[in-house]
Amino acid sequence: MNIFLASACFLPRFGGPARSVCGLADSLSCAGNHVGLWAPDQSALYTPFLSESSNVQRLSGCFQQATSEFGTVDLVHDSGIWLPHNHKIADFCFRHNLPRVVSSRGMLEPWSRRHKGLKKWIAWHFYQKRDLQTADAIHVTSPVEAATLSNLGFKTIWNVPNGIEFPPREFVRNNVDREQPLPPSGLRTVLFVGRLYPVKGLPLMLEAWARVRPEGWRFRIAGPDEGGHQKLLERLVSDFDLKKVVSIEGSLDTTEKWKAMHESDLFVCPSYTENFGLAIAEAMACGLPVIATQGTPWSILKETKAGWWVPSNVDAISNALQEATGSSLSELSQMGSISRHYVEEHFTWSRIGDFMLRHYRELMPS
């Protein structure tokens, strides 16, 4: 098949979608498909998330120019909604009778719809609802997101999770039967990796940390600032008197991310909403137990005893943090082992790419 993949950006600052769309592109290409990758900011040309041996065609120019450069297009898969280029893609595919799949990326979940709600209400009524109605299918990555789309009246919904990039073996924790030595700082580490943005719920986590103040632990926050949110977080760290145990760091490259996860003992994701939560899966692949909120689709953490899955409020996060940091390291290691085996079984890109390709073929003429 000739598959055209589009997203807003393929740079690290764009978070999970940049990685997951590139991962899908590589997996589809490895399966023998002609795959093109395009973003309106031209970042497909220099994204770091395609494999070095990738045969994916990196496209540039406006969307129409990119489709001409690509050649025959059997199907367009657009990741994201609300932005002008998403509407242009919808209009182009409608006029040219091209099958179009849209990944909603959690952008229709209640918290996301309330954020900048007036602009989204206007866009919804002027074009966005119609653009989704004319899509041949809507791709989601969790049952919760599928239910949201179904409640909005949409019919053809594909629930296919993201695949993940797995860490090099040297960054996978394998310490079920032994205690990890203390790091030079003398403190165990709780880690967050992701965008610094209101939806991530980091103020909740900082308030929870201030309540619990776990002895012998520190909290690393790593990721790109978005919209000046880092200033609020820094103010909270100061107000809660946490400067000695909380560090707010910038973006990590891929190797730095794996190293940070390998050196940590617990991963946290206190988001109000996530359509998938790629960093959660990556932390699990490194062998970390995870505290995630019920705004994420990771109930499996609780079901398999791989971590904690709690409501998005300070009380619940505080209780989970106290329990986690009060657990023995062997207990945390056992949870991390469960995490690692779960993602290895369910989230390889070859598996996910095969699922998606079967869905694509459903849209092709008989």
Image: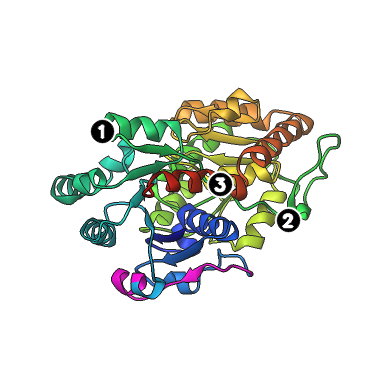
Residue 63: percent from left, percent from top: 31, 69
Is 316 or 37 nearer to us in this picture?
37
Look at the image and tell me whether residue 218 can be seen: no
Query: Is 59 placed left or right of 285 in the picture?
Result: left
- Which one is in front in this view, the residue at disc 1 or the one at disc 3? 3
User: Badge 1 is on which residue?
Assistant: 152
User: Badge 3 is on which residue?
Assistant: 354
Q: SS class of the residue under badge 2?
A: loop
- Which one is in front in this view, the residue at disc 1 or the one at disc 2? 1
**Whether residue 15 is situated above or below residue 304 in the rendered picture:** below
What is the three-letter code of the residue carrying label 2?
A: Pro
**Whether residue 219 is situated above or below residue 53 in the rendered picture:** above
Residue that lies at the very extreme toward the right in this rendered image: 178
Q: Earlier in the sequence, mark 2 or mark 3?
A: 2
* The residue stretch that appears in magenta: 53-67
Q: Quadrant of residue 65?
A: bottom left
Q: Earlier in the sequence, mark 1 or mark 2?
A: 1
C-alpha span from label 1 to label 3: 28 Å
Query: Is 311 placed left or right of 185 in the picture?
Result: left
Is 143 or 24 nearer to us in this picture?
24
C-alpha span from label 1 to label 2: 41 Å
Residue 288: percent from left, percent from top: 68, 40
Q: Are marks 1 and 2 in contact (CB under 8 Å)?
A: no
Task: Give the colouring mode of the picture.
Answer: rainbow
User: Which residue is found at the position 57% from the left and 60% from the top?
Assistant: 32
Residue 143: percent from left, percent from top: 44, 31
User: Which residue is found at the position 31% from the left and 31% from the top?
Assistant: 150
The label on residue 168 is: 2
Is 128 or 223 nearer to us in this picture?
128
